[in-house]
Image (cartoon, rainbow, N blue to C red):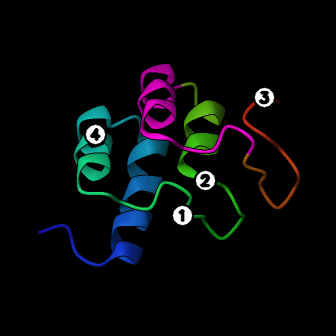
Amino acid sequence: AHGSAQDQGARLLVSAAAGRLAEVQSLIAAKAPLEARDPQGNSALLLAVDRNHPEIVRALIAAGASINAQAANADTPWL
């Protein structure tokens, strides 16, 4: 129902960046790849941190997203 893993990963990135918690939770439940990356190397968690969506950050970490992920520019969720 949610498409391929690649599609799910892309949608997770967009949803996390946009602050759409319900969609992020739905994609997590559908086993979307949590470590999918955008063209800049950002994971959904990095995007959620960067755009200040703490509820999405919490949901992704609870689902097992890597808190040590690094983007292409070496940013981590801690910066």
Up-down: is 11 above or below 66?
A: below
Which residue is found at the position 87% from the left and 55% from the top?
73
Distance, label 2 to label 3, CA atoms, is: 13 Å
Residue type of the residue flagged with mark 1: Ala
Q: Which residue is mark 2?
A: 43
Q: Residue furthest top?
A: 54
**Is 43 part of what is drawn in magenta?**
no
Residue type of the residue flagged with mark 3: Trp
Distance, label 3 to label 1, CA atoms, is: 19 Å
Distance, label 1 to label 4, CA atoms, is: 15 Å
Which residue is found at the position 72% from the left and 48% from the top?
69
Distance, label 1 to label 2, CA atoms, is: 6 Å
Q: Earlier in the sequence, mark 4 or mark 2?
A: 4
Q: Residues within 10 Å of mark 4 (few under 14, many from 20)?
A: some
Distance, label 4 to label 2, CA atoms, is: 16 Å
Q: Which residue is mark 4?
A: 25
